[in-house]
Image (tube, grey):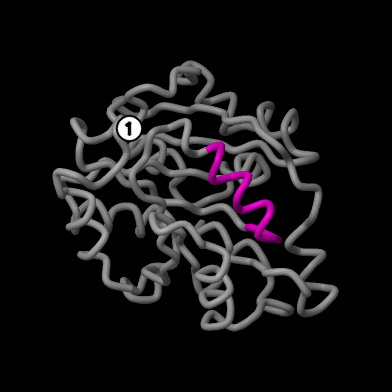
């Protein structure tokens, strides 16, 4: 996708959310998987609480922590994500393929070099937080940008007791205002309507009838 286009729109005087017009530029690097359009829209509502202008939905080639078997081709997952991302300020992209990065720490570093004036926030589901300490150089990720965690069924308590959550506990906040400007490390947990469907189960069952899909967290 044309990454310059949303940035130009974001910086126009009349564009963007009212809250963030005086705090530009603010962008979200978004990593959560969605099984259905309904779940995507519920997450969108929760993320509006952060006052963000854009959501960059990263559809990555392969999750290093999951087997390739059963994973749909990247082009198919990207197209499904674009269908699911019906909001004009949600931009689904395969920028990891374009950048040639495999791990989140490298993707974040590359994005911050390319867009030094942008305030990025990393968002993931609570199930991803549960495994966050297994990500390559996860502490560097936390030191580079604020992290927002969206609760998901069956992983809330376990995630908040995970090694990474315990390490980041002193930096947890409930204040959404100015979250993008908080100096990292910073952690916020967003609760909202939860969908019990599993992207893994959907992949195992074959092509879904409703919009799929496994845009994996960019570990």
Q: Residue furthest front?
A: 14
Residue 62 in picture, x, y percent from top left: 55, 71
Q: Point out the image quarter for the N terminus.
A: bottom left
Residue 45, magenta (yes or no): yes
Which residue is painted at 79% across and 54% down in the image? 197
Residue 71 in picture, x, y percent from top left: 67, 77
Residues 80 and 158: in front is 80
Residue 8 in picture, x, y percent from top left: 17, 57
Residues 163 and 44: in front is 44
Q: Residue furthest right?
A: 205
* Whether residue 169 is situated above or below residue 80 in the rendered picture: above
Residue 6, magenta (yes or no): no
Instruction: Please tell me whether the stretch drawn in magenta is mainly helix, strand or loop.
Output: helix
Image quadrant where residue 121 sits: top left
Start and end of the magenta stretch? 34-46
Identify the residue position indicated by label 1 in the image: 180
Residue 168 in picture, x, y percent from top left: 50, 25
Residues 212 and 112: in front is 212
Which residue is painted at 60% across and 40% down in the image? 129
Residues 14 and 188: in front is 14
């Amino acid at each position: 996708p044309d990454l310059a286009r949303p940035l130009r729109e974001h910086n126009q005087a009349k564009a963007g959310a009212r809250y963030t017009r005086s705090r530009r530029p603010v962008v979200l690097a978004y990593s959560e998987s969605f099984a259905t359009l309904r779940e995507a829209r519920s997450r969108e509502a929760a993320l509006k609480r952060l006052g963000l202008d854009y959501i960059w939905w990263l559809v990555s080639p392969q999750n290093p922590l999951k087997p390739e078997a059963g994973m749909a081709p990247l082009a198919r997952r990207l197209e499904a994500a674009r269908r699911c991302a019906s909001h004009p300020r949600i931009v689904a992209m395969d920028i990891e393929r374009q950048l040639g990065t495999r791990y989140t720490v490298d993707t974040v570093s590359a994005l911050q070099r390319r867009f030094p004036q942008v305030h990025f926030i990393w968002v993931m589901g609570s199930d991803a937080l549960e495994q966050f300490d297994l990500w390559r150089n996860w502490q560097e990720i936390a030191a580079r940008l604020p992290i927002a965690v969206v609760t998901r069924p069956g992983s809330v308590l376990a995630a908040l007791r995970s090694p990474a959550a315990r390490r980041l506990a002193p930096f947890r906040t409930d204040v959404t205002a100015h979250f993008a400007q908080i100096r990292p490390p910073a952690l916020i947990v967003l609760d909202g309507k939860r969908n019990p469907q599993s992207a893994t189960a959907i992949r195992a069952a074959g092509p879904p009838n409703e919009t799929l899909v496994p845009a994996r967290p960019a570990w």
